[in-house]
Image: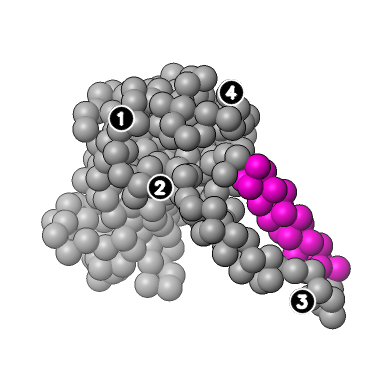
Amino acid sequence: MKVVLRNNAIFVQGGSKTLEEPWMEEFFDHHIQNTLFLDNGVLVLNNANSSDQKEDFLETLSERYTKLNELSGSFYSRSLKRCKTAAIRIEVPYRKSETVDVKLYALDHRRVKITLLTPNQWIMRYLKQQLSSLIIDTAASNLLIDVSTPVAKGRLEKTLNRREVLHFELNYLYDDAFMSRLYGNYRGWGYGNDAIDQMIRYHAIFEIPIGSNPNDLKKRYRALAKRYHPDRVQTKGPEIINKYTEKFQLLQEAYDKLQAVS
């Protein structure tokens, strides 16, 4: 384990099991609403209402770090406590991604049941944090959420568009009637995971929710196509030109597909 104070934040670099230590899990469970889940770690923002729990965490962190590195505990303890209002970023070293299967079942247009077929406490924490305002009921590997409003559906779509958290690869699985139950007017889009993934991904590109007005889609397409047109960067290097070209082609592909089912 390595602890570094940098840019008004506490960086903790640990082994692959760092996040699974009980004192770490207790800290994150308490600060779940202040936690940002990254591809390679977590960032816990400061919460003035949880200062006592944070001081306890910093004390334990100091004890573990100094013991592992045979250092003077008092110096690091004082240093960390002086930074008790700083954000804490815990980075997990790269490891081969593990796939976590997540099943989604739409009971109707208002409720969705989410089940982790591959039990994983950290992915469950991520889903709870992202969907906290929508949760009706929760169990060890299940969430029942209320998506009766367009805003709620948009929140779910945004969550599903992310596929990697903490080196875990999220594999979402949908029943064939998922789209028709949740978005009745999208029966013609197609069935199966690939079609649904494509629908969610294309809407995310334009940053609009599924079921948006076709005119809103057209406005977003025109704005983004203008922003990413390769002609705007013809004087730049090949890397930038290729990046804009790929983005522009993806916009065109997504727009054509969404137009066909709108």
Q: Is residue 216 left or right of residue 22?
A: right
How much space separates mark 1 and mark 2, taking CA atoms? 14 Å
Instruction: State the mark number for residue 111.
Output: 1
Q: Residues within 10 Å of mark 1 (few under 14, many from 20)?
A: many
Membership of 192 in magenta stretch: no
Camera-nearest residue between 32 and 111? 111
User: Under tag 3, what secondary structure?
Assistant: helix
Q: Is residue 113 left or right of residue 193?
A: left
Query: How many C-alpha atoms fall within 10 Å of the one at disc 4: few (<14), some, or many (≥20)?
Result: some
Instruction: Give the magenta-colored segment's residue range.
Output: 238-260
SS at badge 1? strand
Of the residues shown, which amino acid type is indicated by label 4?
Gly
- Which residue is more in the foreground, 254 or 218? 218
- Disc number placed over residue 154 in the picture, else none: 2
Q: Residue at x 49, y 53 (%)?
A: 213
- In the orientation shown, which residue stands out farthest toward the bottom? 235
**What secondary structure is found at the residue carrying circle 4?**
helix
